[in-house]
Amino acid sequence: MKTRLLVLLAALALLGLGAMTAPAAHAGTQATCWTDPTSGPIGTVFTVYCAGFSRDTILNVYYVEPDGAALAYGDIKTNETGSIALPFFTKFGTFGATSVGNWTVVADQKGLANSIIAHAQVTFRVTGGTEGVSGAAIWTDPTKVTPLHTFILYGSGFAPNETVTVWWEYPNGDCSSFTYHDWIFNTPGYRGYSSLYVGDVKADAGGNFAVNDGFNPTACEGAYRYVARGNGSGLGGETWVTLVGNAITTTAGASLSASPTTVAGAADWVYFTGSGFGANSPVSCWITTPHSQVTAVDQLWQPPTKSDASGNLSFSIYTGSLAPQFILASEGALGTYTMTCKGETTGAIATADFRVTGGTFTP
């Protein structure tokens, strides 16, 4: 069973990826947005309508996940009446479904100096519900795991030699998009799902199967509901696996601080300083999101993090995923993030928290 990495294709199907420009200012307008329907279960195709903008004008449109992560929809041109109509899909065949909760779509018309001269937004609700299965059984060993440690998923009671489709439902119906800080520049890790296809397995002649599975460090912590259904028989079963993070113990004498401690979700900077990591030691650092997703900090635009002769270090990160003049995505869920650094020579560990704020505008 394949491990899930960056689920980019479904994110592109969710809403065509474009870019949202960083706003300089905005003003009140008569522009407005609404949806049809205003709420609906997974599988609903919402239509987002916006009106009151200038005709034949490019609007900068983005959407906000229930936990506050913002991602670009694209640059959309209004029609001759200054209106747009856009689809919002909540289910992608058997691949997955969007997070349950309140979603927001924002539309901005830009003026000179990147000012916002017309702004509108709308919030709509995606409701969930588990899909019932019966007649077969699945279970795991163990039932609680940490990232990068595999478990065995067992199944029995399916039809002989049939293909069984397996999927999971995320803890609390939501796992946020986030930011990778480990390439030449920041890149978005697209999530925003409530359920996700895991894979197909084939039962043996006795209707049984056993496969290995596991979670990578960017998975959200919590209890996952695994579901399996036979494609021919319709027989199915469910079980739960709990993902917990690896415990971190800080080292006396090592310290790390963040400045500022509150930043915007995109195009902002956090500066870190630390001490007590040992002289001239390579230092590994990683970010933990409010959903306990873990990503390494190792970017090519700055030298590898290393302490000086006194055991001190300093480095910085910027929030969100950016291209020249454009914001592709915000940092991720709103809330408290933790930077952890470990001196590779001494093993000294220190952490620093910072808070990401942001979201939709109020004109």
Image (spheres, grey):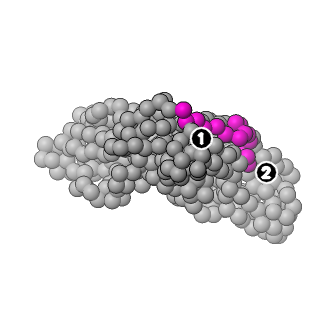
Q: Amino acid at mark 1?
A: Ala
Question: Which residue occupies the foreground of this view, 123 or 296?
Answer: 123
**Up-down relation of residue 191 to residue 31 (above or below):** below
Q: Nearer the viewer, residue 130 or 246?
A: 130
Mark 2 lies on residue: 237
Q: CA distance from mark 1 to mark 2?
A: 47 Å
Q: In the image, which is nearer the foreground, mark 1 or mark 2? A: 1
Q: Secondary structure at mark 2?
A: strand
Which three-letter amino acid code belongs to the residue tagged 2? Answer: Gly
For the point 70% across and 36% down, the residue is: 38
- Quarter assignment of residue 318: top left
Give yes or no for residue 329 being in the magenta stretch. no
> What segment is highlighted magenta in the picture?
30-44
Report x, y in % for residue 272. 26, 40
Residue identifier under label 1: 51
- Identify the secondary structure beneath mark 1: strand
Q: Quadrant of the N terminus?
A: bottom right
Side of 214 relative to 179 (left or right): right
Q: Name the residue: 43% across, 32% down.
A: 27
Left or right of 233, for residue 254: left
Residue name at image x 33 percent, y 43 percent: 113
Nearer to us in this view, 349 or 230:
230
Residue at the farthest left position: 309
Rendered location of residue 252, percent (x, y): 27, 33
Question: Residue at the spot x=33%, y=59% of the render?
Answer: 184
Residue 158 position (above or below residue 307):
below
Q: Position of residue 282 (x, y in %)?
A: 24, 53
